[in-house]
Amino acid sequence: MSPDKATARSYLDIDDLSIVLKHQPTHRLLRSVGLHVMPGEVRGLVGESGAGKSMIGKTIFDILPRAVEIVEGSVRLGDDELLKLPQSARRKVIARTSALIPQDPLTALNPVRRIEPQITDRLTRILGVSKSDARERARALLDEVHIRDPESVLRNYPHQLSGGMRQRVLIAAAFAAEPKLIVADEPTTALDVTVQKQILKLIAEMQARHGTALLFVTHDLGVVAKICQNVSVLYGGKIVEDTEVKSLFARPTHAYTQALIAATPRYDRPDESLVPVPAAVIEATQHEIAAADDAWLGARQAGGRR
Amino acid sequence: MSEHARHRRPVSWRLILSGSWLAIVIICAVFAPYIAPHDPLAQDLLLERLPPFWVSGAEPGYYLGTDGLGRDVLSRIIYGARIALTVAFVAATAACLIGSTMGLVAGYFRGWLDQIVSRIVDIWMSFPPVLFSILLVAVIGTGLHSVIIAITAIDWIRFCRVVRAETLVQTRMDYIDSARAAGFSRLNILVREVFPNALPTIVALLSLEMGIAVIVEAILSFVNLSISTDDPTWGGMIAEGRTIIHFAWWVLVFPLIALFLTVLAFSQFGEGLRDRFDPVLR
Amino acid sequence: MSEPLFDVENLYVSFPDPNHKTLFGQMPMVEVLHGIRLKIEEGTVVGLVGESGSGKSTLGRALVRLLDPVSGSIRFAGTDITYLDENALRPLRRDLQVIFQDPLSALNPRLTIGTIIGRPLQLHGLANGRREALKLTQEALEHVGLPTAFVARYPHELSGGQRQRVGIARAIATRPRFVLADEIVSGLDVSSQAQILTLLADLKKDLGLTIVFISHDLSVVRRLCDQVVVLRHGEILENRPTGPLFEHPEHPYTAELKAAIPLPEVDGDWLNS
C-alpha cells in the first residue's frame, strides 16, 4: 500500500488519486488510489462491479465522464505528469505511449471498416508512419498473434471473423505502436473458456516479448492467478490489498480478499461449500472506508483553511 | 445501490414551460367568446391595417392590430386556436389509435400480418405527404372533417413504424419469454406486458403528432383547402398576411408566432412527459 | 426404476438462418440440435455445459417448450409435450418454470415485483384473488431471502443479486416440479454468485425440485449438479454423474474444457499446458 514500493522505474504511477462526483464533492468514487506498473510487469486490478476498476482505466486514458472530477492525486506515464499537462498535450502523450485491449471484441471494432485501417490508424495518423510501412507492420503483427492468413484478414470486415479472431486483431492493434503501457479491460470475459485460455496465453506472450507494462483489469481471480505477477484488490474505490499474486493466494491479508477467494467456486474442490462473502466483512470494510473518508475530508478542510 | 435509484427527479422546466403555453392555448380555445376582445369576423374598413399597440397610429383595444379587412388580429388568433386544437386532438388521437394498434400487432405477431402492414407502410411512405393531403382534401372536399381525415390517413404510419420498432425491441426481452413460460396467452402478453413498455413512446409521439397536425392544418389553410376562408385559422391568417407583409407585417407575424410556439410546446411536452414518467432510468 | 421426469428422444431443432436472407423474406433453416437423447430423473440437478453455439440454451428452451422442435419427442411426466400448442401447454406451465440469465431483461420494468410474481399464481388458480396472491408472493420472497416489502418495488430499484432472487422467487412460487436455470449466475459478482448458488442448492433440498442448470462455468456446475451433460455443435458428447465425469473425462473435449478453467492458484505451467 505504501507508495515507497514504487520505484523510479515504474512506468505508470498513480498516487493518491481521488475522484468525486461534481455535484456531490464529499462522495469519493476513487479513494486515494495508488497503483504502479513497471515495464515488463503484469499487474492485476481485481474488484467486483462498482468497485471503480473502469474509473481507473478511464483516468489513464483521460476519458472520464463529465459528471466526475479529479480532486487530488497524480497520474504519471513515464516522465509526464498527465494532470499537469493541457488537454491536447495530455492526449498526445497518451496516444503515443498507451493502448487499450477492450472487453467486448464485438463492439470494439467498427463494423463498416475493414480490419487493416483499424490496426494501422494509430500508426499513420498519430505516429506519421507511411501507409505501406503501416501495412507491412500490420501484416507482421497479425502473424505475431498467430493469425494464419494475415493478408485476407486485413481485407475482412469484423463480422467475418469469430470472437476469438477479433480479440486477436484487437491485441495486434494494441501492440501496433509499441506502447509502453497496455491496459487490458476484462479482455476475455466475453469469450468461451477454451478461447479465453488461448487469448490469455497470447497476451502473456506478446507482453513478455515487447516488455510492456500491462495493467490487467478483471473480476476473475482465476485469471489473475494465471497471468499476473502482482495484484491490487479494489473495493469501493479503495485499494484494500496490494501484493504479489503468490502471497495473495497463500496469505491474503485483508478480510475482504480472504472472503472473495473463499467465495470463488473451484471444480477441484467440490466438497468445500461456497462461502458467500459474509455481511460482517462487507460491514467492516465499509467502516474502514468511512474512516478513511473522514480522515481525508478532515485533512482537506484543514488544508483549505490554510 | 437500490436506495440510490429511488430519488425523485428534479422539476423539469421543459415540462413547465411547454405545459403552461399549451394551457394558455387550450383556455383561449375553450373560452374564446369570453376572452376575445372583438368579433373575429367583424369587418370595419375604417379600421383596416391598424398596427399593434406599441406602434404609433394604434387604436386602443386592438392590441395586436387589425388585418386588411379591419378584423382584430388578436381575436382571430384566439378563435384560430379552436380550430388548431380541434384538429390537433382529434386527428392525432385517431392517427395514434390506428397506427399504434397496427404497429403493436405487426411487431408482436410478426409473420404474414407484419408483412401486410409493412408493405402498406412502404406504399404509404412513397407518397409525398403534403401533396397527398392536398389531393385527399381536393377529392373529399374542404372542411374541418376533411382536414382531420386527411391528417389521420397520412400520419398513422408514423405511429405504426415507431411502435412496431419498439414492440420488436420489447419482444426480444426475456420477460416476454418469461410470461410465455408462465402460461399467459399471446393477447394477454401483448396487452399487459408489451403495451405498458411501448406507452411512453406512444405518448411522446402523440404529443409530437398534435404539433404536426397543427402545422398540416395551417398548410392546408394556407393553400385555402381547409375550412371556409372567413373562419379564422392560423394558416389562413398567414396566407392573408403574406400578401400585405410590406404594409402590415403584424398580420403575418403574430399567427406565425402562435403557430411556432404551439408546435414547439407540443413536441417538448411529449419529450418532457416521457422523461418525467418513465419509471425506468435509462 | 420409475419413469423419468423428462424423456427426450431423437430431438431435432432448427432456426431460420439470419445470415442468408433471401429476397422474399424466406430464410433457410440451420439445424441447432441433432438427435438429442436425454433422460432426467425427478429430484436431480442436471448441468448442461458447452461453449457458445453448443445448443445448450436451445435444448433448455425446448424442454420448457419456449420453442418448437422440428422432430423427435419430449415427454414430461408421462405426457408428450413436443407439439402441444399454447392452450394445451397452459395447465403444465406451473410445473415448468424458468429462471433467466439476465434478470433485468427477464423482469418487466413497468410492473412491480408483487405483480410479476403474483399474476402467474392467479392465472394458474393457485391464489384466489389479489390478497391471497400477495400472501403467496411474500412467502416466495421470504423463501429466497428478500424482504416482503419488495412487492411494491420495481425491478430497476434492486441490485443485480436481488433481481436474480426475484427471478428465483417467481419460478418457485407456483411450486413447480421442474425449473430451468439458464446461466443464472454468469452476470453476477462472485459474492452474489455464491449466495445464489447456495440458495438454489437449499431450494432443491427443501422443495425436491428437478433442475436443469445451464452454464459455461464448470466450477459452478461441479458444485451444484448431480449429473452433467456436455454439448458441442448440437450433440451430446458425454452424459454422466458429476464426480466421475470430472475425475475421468471420457471425451477429450470434456478434458479440454476442464483444463481451460483458470483455477485461483498460481501455476506457472498452466498457460503452456
Image: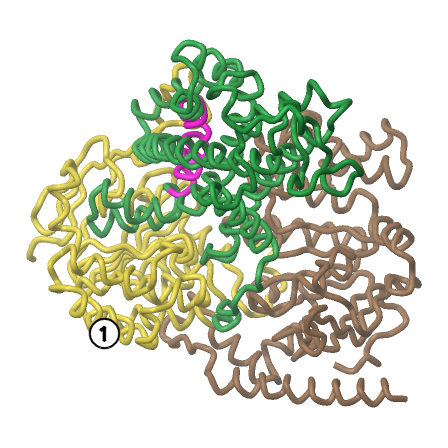
Chain colours: A brown, B green, C yellow
Q: Which percent across, then down, holds residue A169? A: 67, 39
- Is residue A149 visible in the rendered structure shown here? no
Q: Which percent across, then down, holds residue C183? A: 39, 55
What's the magenta bit mostly, secondary-structure-wise? helix
Res. B100 image quadrant? top left
Q: Callout 1: helix, strand or loop? A: helix
Give above or below for C253 relative to B249.
Answer: below
Q: Which percent across, then down, holds residue C235? A: 32, 39
Q: Chain of mark 1?
A: C
Whether the magenta-drawn stretch holds residue B165 is answered as yes
Res. B107 image quadrant? top left
Residue type beneath disc 1 = Glu
- Bin the neighbour count of mark 1 within 10 Å (Cα to Cα): few under 14, some 14-19, many 20 and up: some
- Is residue B256 visible in the rendered structure shown here? yes
Front one among C26 and A275: C26
Q: Which residues are magenta?
A: B152-170
Res. C85 image quadrant? top left
Query: Which residue shows up at 82% across the image and 51% down it?
Result: A179
Q: Is residue A92 left or right of residue A168?
A: right
Whether the magenta-drawn stretch holds residue C211 is answered as no
* Residue under numbered circle 1: C139
